[in-house]
Amino acid sequence: MQLIELSASPLSVPLREPFVIATATMTHTRAVLVRAVVLHEGVRYTGFGEAAALPPVTAEDQPDMLVSIAGASAALQGSQVSAQGIANALADVGLGPVASAGIECAVLDALSRARGLPLHRMLGSSVDTCPLVTDITLPIGDPAHLAELARGYEKAGFSVFKVKVGKHRADDARVLSALARAVPRAHVRLDANEGYTADDALRLLDEARSFGLVVECFEQPCARTRIDELARVTAEGGVPVVADESCRSLAELEAVALNRSAHAVNLKLVKFGGLGATLAVGRRAKELGLGLMAGAMVETRLGLTAMAHVVTALGGVDWVDLDTAFLLDDDAFVGGYEARGAELRLVSGPGLTVALA
Ligand SMILES: [Mg+2]
């Protein structure tokens, strides 16, 4: 099939409230919307992809991606594309992983629409659906405010909270204490975004347990360069440690397994450069006996749907963290999935089934 159009436009969707993590604050998404059109037997099929930046977690940002994707468009437009060949073609163009992920997604969406297949089928899935029950993220903030937010989310059907920590351990403990009182039946997943020492991480885990909280896992407690500290939390923390910033490539995945610096890894499309690469990392992680989280940057329904198709192709993951569309003040897209409380159900149909709102 021929790629006859590849275009990029800013995708800046406001958040309901600032997204504050240990390393960044966001008020809008900083993504690029990629649109790909393929021609098949005289019919045009349009696909969409989200290149979601979250600097400094991602090296790329929206302005530079608008330029780099325009350059890739000049190189790729008019060429024959295939599901197997697009990743190689993108590697030849030399884009960063976030821009590559957006383009690959748009092309795969268009190709699967042309073939009349759900995208996860083109990725090799053998099932139609798999359980997709997401957590919901609480940013770093005031304990009373976060407790109130959590009560609202619980009423809306969420029972697992991903709690951002890692700036000040004592403040984080106050938040956990407030949550234990506000939503005592809830489970929590902690994410320090590299912010802690091993001592801080282990102490916060002890405090969380003393409040009666069930901690399902602890994501990236320490800096990715501090392998000794990560390995210590992994060995002594008593909960699964999930590598996120520490696992951005297949080589880093192998290092995580070798160093025993985590029990699991967080899969995100924009870290590995696309759906195919993310699927490969997920399959290799399973071979290595590592657990899997499915996550995203601050992404809209479009990016989350694409990741949900990868999860389906993997036959499910241990922890689903595909919640950021719930944090946005505006849904730029329709389709993809239907949300019932915390449960996401993929809409069946060709491609991603996502359309512009
Ligand atoms: Mg994370």
Image (tube, rainbow, N blue to C red):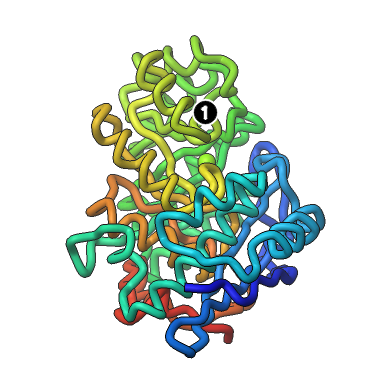
Q: Position of residue 271 (x, y in %)?
A: 55, 43
Question: Disc 1 marks which residue?
Answer: 246
Instruction: Name the residue: 23% across, 62% down.
Output: 130
Q: Is residue 143 visible?
A: no
Q: Residue lying farthest left? A: 126
Residue type of the residue flagged with mark 1? Ser
- Lateral position of residue 254 relative to residue 228, left or right: left
Residue at (66, 49) in percent of width and height: 93
Return the residue found at the far top.
228
Q: Is residue 306 above or below residue 208?
A: below
Q: What residue is drawn where x is 29% and y is 31%?
A: 290
Quarter of the figure with residue 255: top left
Q: How many marks?
A: 1
Residue extending furthest toward the bottom:
42
Q: Residue at x 59, y 18 (%)?
A: 225
| Quadrant in the rendering for residue 121 | bottom left
